[in-house]
Image (cartoon, helix red, strand yellow):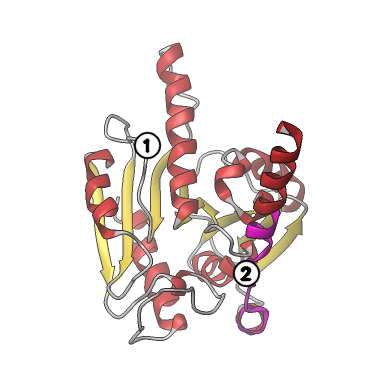
């Protein structure tokens, strides 16, 4: 009976995660073509690396996709950030659920070395980011790795300077961590539970910034269409992605 129950739960989970939001490959391909001279992208089994061209690297951003969204749907935002000088790492998540791959950044960091050029990025600042449930997973990764340093009494190996949350909030507390936080919301987002979002602010670190995109929605942080239950946007997906990339860039540069 127990075996049957496990099989049924596993099957239900696979059905649930198999019904995901697919990336708008046309929109992403058009942007990639427009930025072919400014950004090079490299596919790996672990995910995708986006490298700025013809400029100095500013920082490294690792982005965790939202749940049940094809990870490549966030390529549009990654291209926009890479255009602004940021190396972007977009990990592929098990069953399109970031909480099943909290440590995905470690795998993709190792893969990055096989695909980028020889310029060292060891002296660059690193930021972790995520959309929706991907932001929850990103925050959990930070907390778990910070805790390792707390136990040993040495945080020198902790690489990340901050976290960027897109329509997301931390379930785990970052309040005692030496990191920066940027929270970006769409004013017309009807997917995020605002009561939970407001309650989560107690988990934010001291250095936290909130930014609201007027007319933006939950779905427009990626290129995957409209998510069930989302609000009505008054701006386009391209406008929201452009504004998101600019806000992130100004926040990092304004440190």
Q: At x 42% / y 32%, what residue is drawn?
A: 143
- Does the magenta stretch mainly form a helix, a strand or a loop? helix
Count the marks.
Answer: 2
In this orientation, which residue lies closer to the viewer: 26 or 10? 10
What is the distance, in whole Å, between disc 2 and disc 1 at their CAs? 34 Å
Q: At x 34% / y 71%, what residue is drawn?
A: 190
Instruction: Please give the residue where the numbered disc 2 appears in the rendered image.
Output: 39
Asked if the magenta segment contains residue 149, the reply would be no
Pair 2/1: label in front: 1
Q: Residue 85: x and y, percent?
A: 50, 62
Q: Residue 183: x and y, percent?
A: 32, 56
In this orientation, which residue lies closer to the viewer: 226 or 215? 226
Asked if the magenta segment contains residue 16, the reply would be yes
Q: Is residue 206 above or below residue 69?
A: above
In this orientation, which residue lies closer to the viewer: 54 or 241? 241
Work out which residue is located at the far front of the displayed protein and give it.
1
* Residue 61 can be seen in this image: yes
Q: Which mark is residue 38?
A: none
Q: Residue 214: x and y, percent?
A: 26, 77
Tell me: 125 left or right of 204. Answer: right
Q: Is residue 119 above or below residue 154?
A: below
Q: Earlier in the sequence, mark 2 or mark 1?
A: 2
Question: What range is drawn magenta here?
Answer: 14-28
* Residue 92 can be seen in this image: no
Q: Is residue 121 above or below residue 132?
A: above
Q: Residue 53: x and y, percent?
A: 61, 66
Mark 1: few/some/many CA within 10 Å (<14, 14-19, 20+): some
Q: Secondary structure at mark 2?
A: strand
Write down the quadrant of residue 7 in the picture.
top right
In the picture, the quarter occupied by the N terminus is top right
Q: Secondary structure at mark 1?
A: loop
Instruction: Please give the residue where the numbered disc 1 appears in the rendered image.
Output: 172
């Amino acid at each position: 009976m127990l075996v049957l129950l496990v099989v049924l739960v596993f099957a239900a989970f696979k059905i649930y995660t198999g019904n995901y939001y697919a990336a708008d490959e046309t929109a992403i391909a058009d942007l990639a073509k427009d930025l072919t001279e400014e950004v090079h992208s490299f596919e790996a089994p672990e995910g995708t690396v986006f490298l700025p061209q013809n400029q100095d690297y500013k920082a490294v951003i690792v982005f965790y996709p939202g749940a049940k969204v094809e990870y490549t749907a966030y390529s549009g935002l990654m291209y926009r950030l890479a255009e602004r000088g940021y190396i972007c790492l977009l990990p592929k998540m098990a069953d399109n659920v970031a909480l099943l791959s909290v440590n995905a950044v470690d795998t993709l960091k190792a893969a990055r070395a096989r695909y980028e050029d020889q310029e060292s990025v060891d002296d660059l600042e690193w930021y972790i980011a995520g959309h929706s449930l991907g932001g929850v997973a990103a925050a959990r990764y930070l907390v778990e790795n910070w805790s390792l340093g707390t136990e040993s009494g040495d945080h020198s190996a902790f690489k990340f300077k901050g976290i960027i949350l897109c329509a997301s909030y931390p379930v785990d507390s970052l309040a005692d961590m030496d990191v920066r936080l940027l929270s970006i919301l769409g004013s017309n987002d009807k997917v995020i539970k605002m009561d939970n979002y407001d309650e989560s602010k107690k988990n934010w670190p001291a250095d936290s910034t909130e930014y609201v995109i007027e007319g933006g929605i939950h779905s427009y942080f990626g290129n995957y269409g409209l998510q069930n239950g989302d609000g009505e946007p008054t701006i386009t997906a391209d406008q929201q992605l452009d504004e998101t990339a600019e806000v992130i860039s100004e926040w990092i540069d304004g440190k």
